[in-house]
Image (cartoon, grey):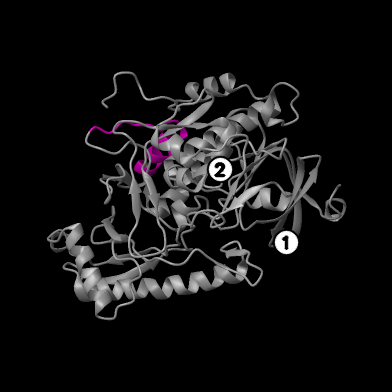
Amino acid sequence: MTAAWARDVPLIAEADVCVIGSGSAGSTAAIAAARGGASVVLVEQMPFLGGTGTAVLDTFYGFWTPGEAPIKVVGGIADEVVAGLRTLGPVLERPNTYGAGTGVTYVPEHLKVAWERLVVDAGVGILLHATLQDAEVVDGRVRSVLIATKGGLRRIAARAFVDASGDADLCAFAGFGFEMAGEIDPAQTLTTTFRMANVDRARRRSITRDELHALMAAAAADGYDLPRREGSDHVTPIDGVTATVMTRLEPNRHDAAGGIVNTTDPGFLTAAEIDGRRQALEYARFLVDRVPGYEAAALVALGTRIGIRETRRVYGDARLTRDDVLAARQFDDQIGLCGAPIEDHRAGPDTRWTYLPPGSAVGIPYRSLVVRDAANVLVAGRCFSATHDAHASVRSMAQCMAMGQAAGSAAALAVMTGSRDGTVRSVASAALRRTLLDADAILAIPAGAPA
């Protein structure tokens, strides 16, 4: 049935493809779809592109497999993003604190501009300060979406949609099936990031990771409120500035009816944002009081928003599992690779890490991007179809970019070939894989790569 608002709300845009969310997955999807010949509109609730990569973190993980002989497993548009960053300033490649593979650390303000340049150059229509409110669905096909803007409610119509919202907002409003994080396995915790200035790097290097964690434990015993005792700090491209992943907040709670309340609930999200900043100030106090190199340091920036690892995970035509990841399973329709370990940030003082065999990577099947209950909707990014454990490996930003490039390319194929009606299951995996390979994506570990 057509939504009542669809008859009354003004149309602000009509395109072949509409992408909801402009993070690593969404911006990449928009670029790929536009390069595939489709007209594209990209919807973002914040005033800039990049999502978690610009609002929360400063490092891309997932480009390489971990270990002493890293293998590059993500390319294509993701490489163009890094190249764009290098034109704007220094970019660091550095080892991950926990052996998850080399990270690419950048200046988040530069990333905002790098994404804008790529998206604008691709011919994508961008709508910032725009928040999804509802979806018009007829027989499993999304026809249009309702968007809240500064000018009021507006409607966007398209033939195909990519849900890259992170929280699967489009699929939730459309009534498509998903698993809420915490329903089966404990959900991953939340993190408010922050940066410190005037850090003496040489003195900070005088202690090891284990010694830092021992200082955290001792400070917690002395009354500092430090829920996570093995958080990390790392250098940035700006001299004397470090960035942190230290705070830890509960990801959800149960309401009176036994349902899960998490950051998709406005009240819970508000409380989490406030508590995350309180906790960040406590970790900053700990660093200045207890950690060599931070004696003259000061907190210079808080993450624009709280870091959310998982909420809704969509049910797709296929679902990636823990066994798939740890066996480094390959698929006939795979559109990307991931060699990152299962990185499970559960409540408590530590984090659980489970690694793939050295030199290996699991494939990401196209079917895990195809929404089970929809005809013309794909997902990309951390709301893709996976179990909790598989998601804890494949949610890194490089993998989100790989998924976004695949989803955008597939959406373009769905509206530019065949019936041209946006039916995503009409896209042959062979044609999609050929398109991705022609655009320098990496779909398999090269023969002869070190094991």
Residue 296 visible in the shown view: no
- Name the foreground residue: 371 vs 20: 371
Give the number of the mark in front: 1 or 2: 2
Who is closer to the viewer here, 308 or 241?
Answer: 308
* Residue at 76% over, 30% down: 421
Q: Which residues are magenta?
A: 69-86
Q: Which residue is mark 2?
A: 384
In the rendering, at what x and y percent does residue 101 appear?
30, 42
Q: Quadrant of residue 253?
A: bottom right
Q: Is residue 328 above or below residue 187?
A: above
Q: Residue at x 25, y 69 (%)?
A: 216
Relative to 442, does residue 241 appear above or below in the rendering?
below
Furthest toward the bottom, the residue is: 223
Judge the density around disc 1: few (<14), some (14-19), many (≥20) Cα neighbours within 10 Å. Answer: few
The picture quadrant where one finds residue 399 is top left
Q: From this viewpoint, is residue 128 visible?
A: yes
Residue 82, magenta (yes or no): yes
Residue sitting at x 35%, y 53%: 352
Task: Identify the residue position indicated by label 1 in the image.
Answer: 151
Q: Is residue 418 left or right of residue 55?
A: right
Check whether the beta carbons of the residues at disc 1 and disc 2 lie within 8 A of each other. no
Task: Identify the residue shown where x is 46% and y is 74%.
Answer: 275
Taking 321 as reference, is 129 above or below it? below
Residue 331 vertical position relative to residue 311 in the rendered view, above or below: above
